[in-house]
Image: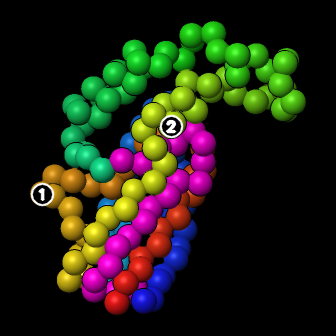
Amino acid sequence: MRCLRRHLHITTAPGINLHDLTGEIRALVAESGIRTGFVTVSSRHTTTALTINENEPRLLEDVRTFLGKLVPADAGYLHNDIAQRDCPPDEPENAHAHIIAMLMGSSEAIPLVEGELDLGRWQLVLLVELDGPRQRTVAVQVCGD
């Protein structure tokens, strides 16, 4: 079995937003020359998530609205009491982002068949920024034969 490992670097916008990584991942699969195996994608941050879903603007707005209702940013989290934590004074109040990331997850595994990601017609690999704007890194590993 062979493996190719790379990092993707993404500059995100403020707030909750989604970034389609599918094209960059497909390019890494092509670079690897691997035809059968799997691809793992993993966020290297505690305030981002990864998911496989559709990249349709109205759906993405629904996702933002739903996440804001599910885990409101202003709910009075202990993590946001910066004076009680051992952290820099400019640390953001981002407990909501950490909680959403825990609920959504930070990695995905995708089968690789005949050199292609085995995704459904509308499925894409999306990085979900929960505390932007930031510079983000996503690890991608392509393994197989």
Q: What distance separates the C-alpha of mark 2 from that of mark 1?
A: 26 Å
The amino acid on which the numbered mark 1 sits, given as a three-letter code, is: Arg
In-image side of 59 versus 135 (left or right): left
Q: Dot 2, how many residues are within 10 Å of its Cα: few (below 14), some (14-19), or many (20+)? A: many
Residue lying farthest left?
121
Which residue is located at x 23 percent, y 33 percent? 59
Which residue is located at x 26 percent, y 46 percent? 53
Q: Quadrant of residue 28?
A: bottom left
Element type at mark 2: helix
Q: Which mark is residue 49?
A: none
In-image side of 53 versus 120 (left or right): right
The residue beneath circle 2 is 101
The region drawn magenta spans: 32-51
Residue 32: give x, y in percent of width and height: 40, 86
Closest to the observer, 38 or 63: 38
- In this view of the protein, can residue 131 be seen by the observer? no
46 in the magenta segment: yes
The residue beneath circle 1 is 121
Residue 52: give x, y in percent of width and height: 30, 50
Against 17, is 24 above or below?
below
Residue 70: give x, y in percent of width and height: 41, 18
